[in-house]
Image (cartoon, rainbow, N blue to C red):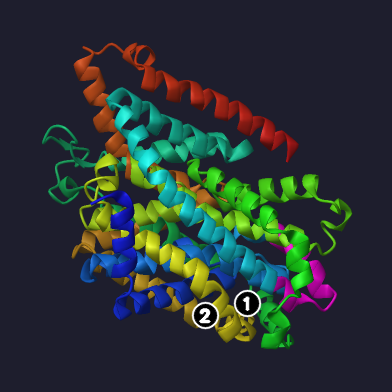
Amino acid sequence: MSTIGQILGGFATMADPMLILYLLLGFFIGVIFAIIPGLTATLAIVLLLPMTYSMPMNSALAMCMGIFMAGYYGGSVTAITINIPGAPSSCMTGIDGHALMQKGLGARAIGHATFASAIGGAIGVVLLIAISPLAVKAALLVRTPGKTSLLLFAFIVIAAMEGKNWVKAALMTVLGMIASTIGMGVLAPTARFNYGTITLMEGLDFVPIIIGSFAISEMLAQSEVSNDDFKKIADEAGKLKIKRRDFFPPFSEFKEIGFWRYFKSAVIGYMIGVLPGAGGSMASFVSYAEGKRSSKHPERYGSGSVEGIACAEAANNAVCGGALVPMLSFGIPGDGVTAIILGVLMVYGIIPGPDILTKQMYMVAPMYAALFIAAVVLLPLSLFLFGPYYIKIVKINRLVLYAGIALISISGAYASTNSIFQMVVALAVGVVVYFLRKQKFSPVSFILGALLGPLFEGYFRRVLSISYNNPLIFFTELDSLFFLVLTVVFVIFLRKFGEKS
């Protein structure tokens, strides 16, 4: 069956009412986690990860896609209404959105953010589907030396994305790779760093590592935040009175923005999403800057421009489609959320690569369909059904909420492995990452190092084996040389981008 036929089959699969139910559940979980300050879509998928062991694959992937799309969108609600971005990618939305809120047009700003997110998310998925055949051809051209250099490219670019903290991000990546070496060897059944204990021979399972890095460390970080600060947020949210009809912007404003601006912003978001580690924050910043440069009314940006909202939101939701390209083609996550989704795929024994986009497309086609449905249907539908209540989510008692999340996290670490040792690993990793986060070390870099470390080691050792330990093979093979040169180009670009921003 052709690629398009398999993708259409994915849409047919998503017609199952149970899958729609799982998608709805994931979507609203994603919105809730994105709206509540301190919680993220990444954390939502982390909590979902242990549950996937007892769920059908398509159900788990549908929930992940719902959380993924909603997570990028939900942060705009609090960014607009109370000027607190629920996600880093919503910072640019808050600039113009909150300015409109202060003018009494907050609901209209949320409406524009929703429509832009829906359009950007849909275009991102369409581009993802269109690019899949090209991604397969590109992936088949990359041999083992090239794959090694590609992983090195991912590690270095992700560290460079941290700007001035790139050294700390690089150290976290190395620390993650070191953690992945504990247990049995990748190419040979040799115990490493087990210190004579049978328990450590099984290694550190990636699920407890993920739960510890994101969930446990986040709960420890939130324990330092004053309850008074959250009470002020809740009180401010309680004063807002928003009606459903207020969410409908006038057609003249859509005409002012124009479809071309939506499309251009979505393409920018998609292309940046393809880059490992770039994410929605960079996409929304670049799209916002380009929107202001090409606008007929650049003076409105920063003081309540609906164009600014459209540019930022269309870009950051288009990132969802772009971030899946490197993950599915090469097994390299585009951002923190797709790193966890990669973990979900690994739970079901799905190894991303050219084969999955040719021989096994039917396995991931429902993901494409779920992401498209979440963008086109759930975003506008949820706004008009539950929009007035979204902002009230921040009034949830945080003590009860965080205690529940901590309990789910620890229980999930045990349920995923049936090992008390791995539960202790989650706690230990959480404490260590918590203290490292206080010193501005990146947990995302640590996770990517732990997940991709075994893959990098395997490729690297195979290359040295076939080249008789001659490292020059990385410079004589064209695919490898291409990614090494690309690494240097991106590092230079990111340094200049960081200086300008």
Residue name at image x 36 percent, y 42 percent: 133
| Majority secondary structure of magenta residues | helix
Residue name at image x 43 percent, y 44 percent: 131
Residue 268 part of the magenta-drawn span: no
Where's residue 302, x and y in %? 82, 58
Left or right, 368 with reference to 440: left
Residue 362 sits in which quadrant? bottom left
Q: Amino acid at mark 1?
A: Asn
Circle 1 SS class: helix
Circle 2 sits on which residue?
Answer: 399
Left or right, 300 with reference to 37: right
Circle 1 sits on which residue?
Answer: 227
Marks 2 & 1, CB-CB < 8 Å contact: yes
The stretch of residues the image draws in magenta is: 92-110
Where's residue 495, x and y in %? 64, 31
- As rendered, which of 408 and 303 lies closer to the eye? 303
Residue 68 visible in image: yes
